[in-house]
């Protein structure tokens, strides 16, 4: 007989998103990413970065159930780091913070996923 497909349990995926976001926000290098970049005080930002994203916006989307699964959430978190790499020199305060935060995130979500 055909083996029944195990239903994907997406409920705990959103719980994992909340844990991951809390960890990101608590990180000492999170300060450039906690709120949307103020494009009025950052010349060129709006022209260069087509899809701005930050941790407070991700939190808002999570609260309003706009992430259907962990994958959609990870896409937005990576957007924060890719925007940062695009706009900032690697060897700058914010550029370095972005690299450290991306490394921390990659480590953290793989840890959480291996707990399954
Ligand atoms: C990701 N990104 C951020 C900036 C940027 O200028 N971001 C604001 C820095 C100033 N914000 C703070 O210092 C702060 C914010 C919250 C907090 F709780 C403590 C300190 C510029 C280019 C860019 O690509």
Image: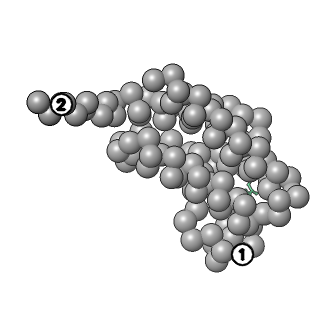
In the rendered structure, the answer to whether residue 6 lies left or right of residue 102 reads left
For the rendered model, the colour scheme is one colour
Q: Secondary structure at mark 1?
A: loop
Callouts 1 and 2 close, C-beta under 8 Å: no
Mark 2 closeness class: few <14, some 14–19, many ≥20 residues within 10 Å: few
Looking at the image, which residue sits at the far right?
91
* The one of 11 and 116 positioned closer to us in this rendering: 116
| Mark closer to the chain start, 1 or 2 | 2
- Residue in the image at 51% along x and 46% along y: 74
Label 1 vs label 2, nearer the camera: 2
Residue where numbered disc 1 is placed: 44
Residue 60 can be seen, yes or no: no
Q: Quadrant of residue 45?
A: bottom right
In the rendered structure, the answer to whether residue 54 lies left or right of residue 98 reads left
In the rendered structure, the answer to whether residue 20 lies left or right of residue 68 reads right
Residue where numbered disc 2 is placed: 4
């Amino acid at each position: 007989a055909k083996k029944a497909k195990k239903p994907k349990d997406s409920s705990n995926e959103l719980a994992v998103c909340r844990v991951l976001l809390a960890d990101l926000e608590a990180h000492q290098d999170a300060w450039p990413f906690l709120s949307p970049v103020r494009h009025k005080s950052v010349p060129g930002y709006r022209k260069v970065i087509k899809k701005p994203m930050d941790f407070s916006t991700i939190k808002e989307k999570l609260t309003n159930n706009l992430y259907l699964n962990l994958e959609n959430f990870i896409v937005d978190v990576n957007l924060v780091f890719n925007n940062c790499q695009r706009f900032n020199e690697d060897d700058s305060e914010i550029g370095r913070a972005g690299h450290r935060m991306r490394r921390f995130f990659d480590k953290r979500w793989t840890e959480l996923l291996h707990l399954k």
